[in-house]
Image: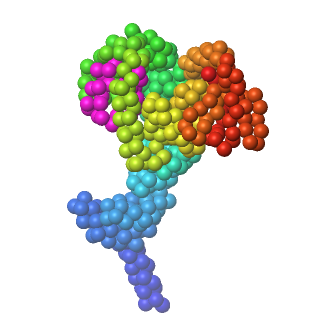
Amino acid sequence: MRKLIDWLVIAILLILLIFLLKEKLGPAFYNKGLRYYSGGDNQKAIGCFKKAISFKPAYAYAHYWLACAYFDAGSQENAEFEFLQSIKYDSQLFWSYKSLANLYASSSRYPQAIEVLESARERGARDPEIIDALDGINFEYAIWCLNEANDAVLKQEMKRAEDLFKLAIELRPDFYLSYYALGYFYYGLKDYSAAEKTLKTVIHKDPYFLGAYKLLGSIFFESGRFEEAIYLYKQALSLNIGESGLYNDLGLALMNIERYEDAIPYLEYALRSDPENIDKLYSLASVYRDSARHKKAITGYQEVIRLRPDYPNVHNDLADIYLSMGEKDKAYDEYRKEIINCQKRLKEDINDISAMNDIAYAYCGINECQQALSFIDRLLGLAPDYQPAYFTRAKILKEQEKMEEALRSLERAKLLSSHPLYIERLIADTKKEAESSLAKKCKLKLIDIVYLKNGRNLRGKLRSESQEKVVLDVGPIGSVTVYRNDIQHIDRGAYD
């Protein structure tokens, strides 16, 4: 009996000894693991932390540092598991929440990262680092959304892109660039109303953000709201007086409301600031043209051609000026150069609608109206809402004296325009031309012309016709009988 009691005491002592050893061995391996980890030896650190946990499974700190070692060693899955274990065993170990959130963020799992940090706050975390981490990951997530949205736009996934832009705003309502990106997105979709609303929010949040003024000014310009565009451009210039592009934009807006004298100084300044910019040179030449400064316009267009002989439509512009000055040969030469340029453009892209419109205009300029119409009709088959084509079509039809059809083309252009005042003036002018042409025709006599097979023709008024012959009154000399076998064709009701 005595021996049994002794063995029982020894067993109890051994159990206590093992327990005490386990309690001490756990921290010992833990501390050894920390030394390996701080020295950059992740694999040995992992071994020590695992041994520490084997002696003390609920050792939250050991789980935390084991997770860090796994993360640094590139084993994210194991790291995630150990971070979750550390939180399980100590819900107040807020380092684990922050580190787990960073792990999720590193693989773009931002919603999970935010959820983890929000969980820490719900459990009482007041650590400024947790709050900063949440703010930082929200910002990082917003930037990720913007990048993904841009990729979606490139892939034509517009609904996804819009949702991502909006999510970026939701994540960081104070970050004005998200609003600007969404505004630019709507601008690209030609949804000017949504773009305007979004960009006004940008300006409200940051009244000194130049890009928002410029883009909103472009929206007003393209919508035909030139007075509002001018106001925006002037506001933008007050923020950056050296921005030469704004002078050009402002000048063009003034040109569109026919304030040429006001427009020219801005355009001239824009060109002086950027003398090699062909677009600005072309804009200034066009204002000179519209304000009847023909010599300056010709000089400007010729410089554009010198710098870039294939600049779109410049030969047409120059030809129009020569034609208005009565220099028909020079005009025709420029129209033909435009045709050659357009043929090259169409060789590169057979469906280039801008090139089709320019070549049609040039063919009309040299009075090859049927060829011109063939290009315009093909263009409108591809792009029925391409407004410039209706102006060109109206010009061709006017050349053919088809005034009613020309007016219908202009009316169609008006329906496609957001600033129809200029078109209304064109329509009014075309109606006057139509009335003048009709009045002129009314003064002429209607005659019949008999074209003979020998190349001659007889002009008069048909008195009678039969299967064998026709009788034509030819004025004071009386009538002429012509047999059908000698007739090429008859033009009835022509104007004399």
Q: Is residue 171 visible?
A: no
Main SS, magenta region, reads helix
Q: Is residue 360 visible?
A: yes
Answer left or right for 119 relative to 466: left
| Residue 300: percent from left, percent from top | 30, 22
Answer left or right for 51 relative to 431: left
| Residue 51: percent from left, percent from top | 35, 72
| Residue 267: percent from left, percent from top | 34, 18
* Residue at x 41% of width, y 13% of height: 291
| Residue 309: percent from left, percent from top | 30, 35
* Residue at x 62% of width, y 15% of height: 440
Residue sitting nearer the eye, 349 or 445: 445
- Which stretch is magenta? 297-323
Q: Is residue 44 above or below residue 89?
A: below
Look at the image and say whether residue 58 sits in the magenta stretch: no
Look at the image and say whether residue 301 sits in the magenta stretch: yes
User: Residue placed farthest to the top in the image?
Assistant: 261
